[in-house]
Amino acid sequence: MEALDKMWAKKEAFDREKEKKKDERFMAALELEKKKVEADLMEKEDKIMSMDMTSSSLTPTQLQYYQIMQAKIVARRCCRISSVPTAGWRNAPSYSQRGSTREGTRRLG
């Protein structure tokens, strides 16, 4: 009976180790996929940010869309590096998605 208990304990230890390695492989693959998605997003955002907005080939609706997308990209990228303060940053007005400033929001309640 004792030999059976030892064999069962070894099997359980082996299964735990196998599951741990499986989880590590999964996490590595997940991290790689996240990096690929982030690189793809950065490529698309860079394309939007480098668009020529003075081109007459854009309709007013398209122009507005790309301006909004650029503003969202800038806001998202600024949030990623917000731990690095720049000169004058604190005095700059903060705009919400509706376009109002922080001061205007305070007045409205």
Image (tube, grey):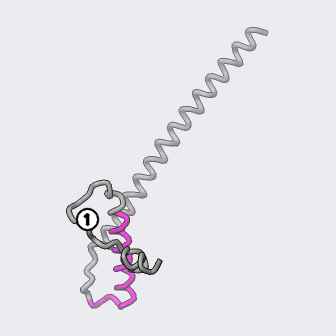
Q: Is residue 15 above or below residue 65?
A: above
Which residue is at 49% across, 47% downward? 30
The residue at 42%/75% (across/down) is 106
Residue 98: give x, y in percent of width and height. Answer: 43, 80
Q: Bin the neighbour count of mark 1 within 10 Å (Cα to Cα): few under 14, some 14-19, many 20 and up.
A: few
- Does residue 24 sit above or below 29 in this rendering? above
Q: Which residues are magenta?
A: 56-77
SS type, badge 1: helix
Q: As drawn, is 51 to the left or to the right of 14?
A: left
Magenta stretch: includes residue 70: yes
Q: Position of residue 20 (x, y in %)?
A: 56, 32
Looking at the image, is 27 positioned above or below residue 8? Answer: below
Residue sitting at 63 percent across and 22 percent down? 13
Q: Quadrant of residue 81?
A: bottom left
Of helix, strand and loop, which mostly describes the magenta segment? helix
Disc 1 residue type (three-letter) = Trp
**Foreground residue, 19 or 81?**
81
Instruction: Please identify the quadrant where the N terminus is shown.
Output: top right
The residue beneath circle 1 is 89
